[in-house]
Amino acid sequence: DAARERHTARPEFARVLLRCSFLVDGTPVGTRDHKTIQLAEGGTVEVLPPFAGG
């Protein structure tokens, strides 16, 4: 949400983010409630845009 809010002038960015997959420290976030995801200090968040027809 924060990334989309920071880039309101780029609606295409927000649209793509809604379709991305996210991994936190190598574990897919999937459909889990985002409020339950813990971000560790120095952890890694990967954002995978849709590709190969996905």
Image (cartoon, helix red, strand yellow):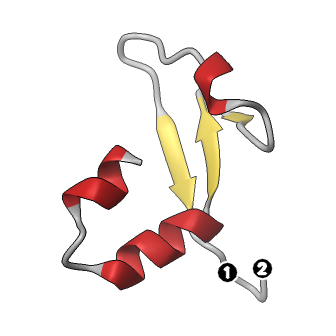
Question: Contact, CB < 8 Å: mark 2 with mark 1?
Answer: yes
Residue located farthest toward the bottom when viewing the structure as drawn: 53
Amino acid carrying mark 1 in the image: Phe
Label 2, label 1: how many angstroms apart (C-alpha)?
Answer: 5 Å
Identify the element where label 2 is drawn: loop
Residue 25 drawn at (x, y percent): 59, 27
Residue 44 location, x and y as percent?
47, 31
| Residue pictured at 46% horizontal, 12% vertical | 40
Classify the position of the C terminus by image quarter.
Answer: bottom right
Q: Which mark is residue 21?
A: none
Rendered location of residue 26, percent (x, y): 66, 33
Classify residue 28 as left or right of residue 9.
Answer: right
Report the residue at 78% width, 43% height from top.
Answer: 30
- Compared across the picture, whether 15 is left or right of 6 comes to right
- Residue on which the image places disc 2: 54
Q: What secondary structure is marked by label 1?
A: loop
On screen, residue 28 above or below 10: above
Q: Residue at x 49, y 18 (%)?
A: 39
**Residue 51 sits in which quadrant?**
bottom right
The quadrant holding residue 35 is top right
Three-letter code for the amino acid on which mark 2 is drawn: Gly
From the viewer's side, name the closer residue of 2 and 25. 2
Mark 1 highlights which residue?
51
